[in-house]
Amino acid sequence: MISRAERILFMGMLIAAVIMAAILIRLRERAQDRLHALQTSTPLAEAVEALPTAVTLLIPNDADNSLQESQRSLPLPHDESARAHVLLETLLESFKEPSSTHPIAGAGGSSSARGLDIDEVFLMPLPQARDGAPNPGKMAVVNFSTAFAQSHPSGIEPETLTLLSIIGTLHANLPAITQVRFLVDGHPRDTLAGHADLTRVYLASSTDSEGGR
Amino acid sequence: MRWTDAVLRGALTFALLPPLSLAVGHARQTQPPSASTPLPPPPPSPSVPSPTPPNVAPRFLVVLDAAHGGDDTGARIADHLLEKDITLSLSARLLSMVSAHGIGVITIRDYDVNLSATSRAEAANRMSAAACILIHATATGSGVHLYTSSLAPTPITRFMPWQTAQSGYVTQSLKLSSEIDSALAHAEIPVTLGRTSLQPMDSLACPAVAVEVAPLAAGSATKAEPLSDAAYQRSILDALTAAIDEWRNDWRQQP
């Protein structure tokens, strides 16, 4: 026969075991939540707010075959490749403005489709000169999206102006870039839209335009 | 020993020649290549002395290249107007107008066919032409756009690199462009000048200019004209004919 005191003791121990189990389960869940949060949102570096920087864009004008300088203020990232990418996306966005002197619909067909014209911009060091001297310049490899190339107006003048404005804008803001190559969707292509040669390497100095009358 | 030299020269010639193509067959007239073309002459026979070239003045020839063709339609100028059709039409009309001035003209493309840039340059370079006019059309801009190669000028050598053969002729190309610019200005047609990298122009071994025709925008001295306007096209062709005629006089005075 179990005494009343033993029954009370047993019930008390059972209740304590249940409470402890509940507490352990809750602590385990909180530990898992903390671990998950560490894996997904831990910043690799302290976030730094990019301050607006004055940049120069070379805007083409189809009417007189010229490039006009336009000053803008943009928050630019510190990484040079990302900086070049932002510069070129901003330049190509200006082509979609209603008052553009070099209208191009672009990949999305409107200014709402930002960031679809250029897939990537890679910066590569140039090989050493023949005398072994280090070459401080860099080559920018601009990778257009297929949609941008397909939507670009066909013609010697519009295609040449697009390439020259890109080369000039890169060199004006990142003077270390002295050579530029163009790819479409990661592959070499003969022309941009049937005319301007994309197989060659362009020198930054070739942006000198003779203009028109 | 001399036979071995001839074999080596023949092998070198074969290596430097681009593959022959159908484009040569489309040319209306053929002439042997000159010593300055990127296509080297055939290897000399070791036992036969080379004949003395005849003392005759070189003939003034003009090559017209209607851009695009076949499945390469070029720019879409209007709903039912393609660049390849306009260039072919302008080329055919310019052929008859320039020929009427007693000037030899060779057209690279005579019908709706897609020719590669290499084939076009190969056909043109065989002609030793005094002028190569590449005809293009676009829907953007206004008037006529004149483009010459962006290659830096270099001296003409016996063997020119195929991709940059035009570099030996850039100075003459700029003079030809200036001649066409003056004629178009005389006809009150707006002109823009530029340099570009364009195939097959960079491979041409002759003074070469790309003439890109655009619609005429309304301005202070001009009224808007579409590219399909017959009178507008006629005024451009008249100016080009006058420029080629003037270039013939300049070309004869060159050393």
Image: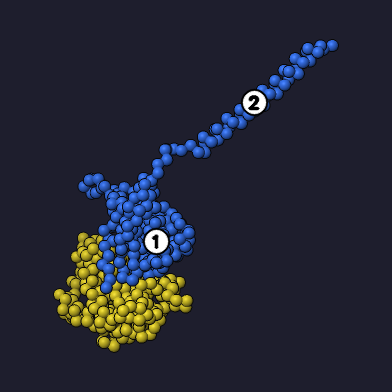
Chain colours: A blue, B yellow
Q: Can see residue A138?
A: yes
Q: Are marks 1 and 2 on the same chain?
A: yes
Residue appearing at x 40%, y 56% in the figure: A89
In the depicted structure, whether residue A121 falls above or below residue A98: above
Q: Can see residue B33?
A: no
Could you tell me which chain the residue with mark 1 belongs to?
A
According to the picture, the residue beneath numbered tag 2 turns out to be: A23
Seen in the image, is A172 located left or right of residue A24?
Answer: left
Q: Position of residue B40 (x, y in %)?
A: 26, 67
| Nearer to us in this view, A15 or B239 | A15
* Quarter location, residue B176: bottom left
The Cα atoms of the two marked residues, 1 and 2, are separated by: 60 Å
Which of the two discs, 1 and 2, labels the residue nearer the N terminus?
A: 2
* Quarter location, residue A157: bottom left
Could you tell me which chain the residue with mark 2 belongs to?
A
| Nearer to us in this view, B160 or B166 | B166
Q: Position of residue B158 (x, y in %)?
A: 21, 66
Q: Position of residue A102 (x, y in %)?
A: 37, 66
**Which of the image's four quarters has the N terminus of chain B?**
bottom left
Mark 2 burial class by Cα count in 10 Å: few <14, some 14-19, many 20+: few
Residue appearing at x 34%, y 56% in the figure: A72
According to the picture, the residue beneath numbered tag 1 turns out to be: A94
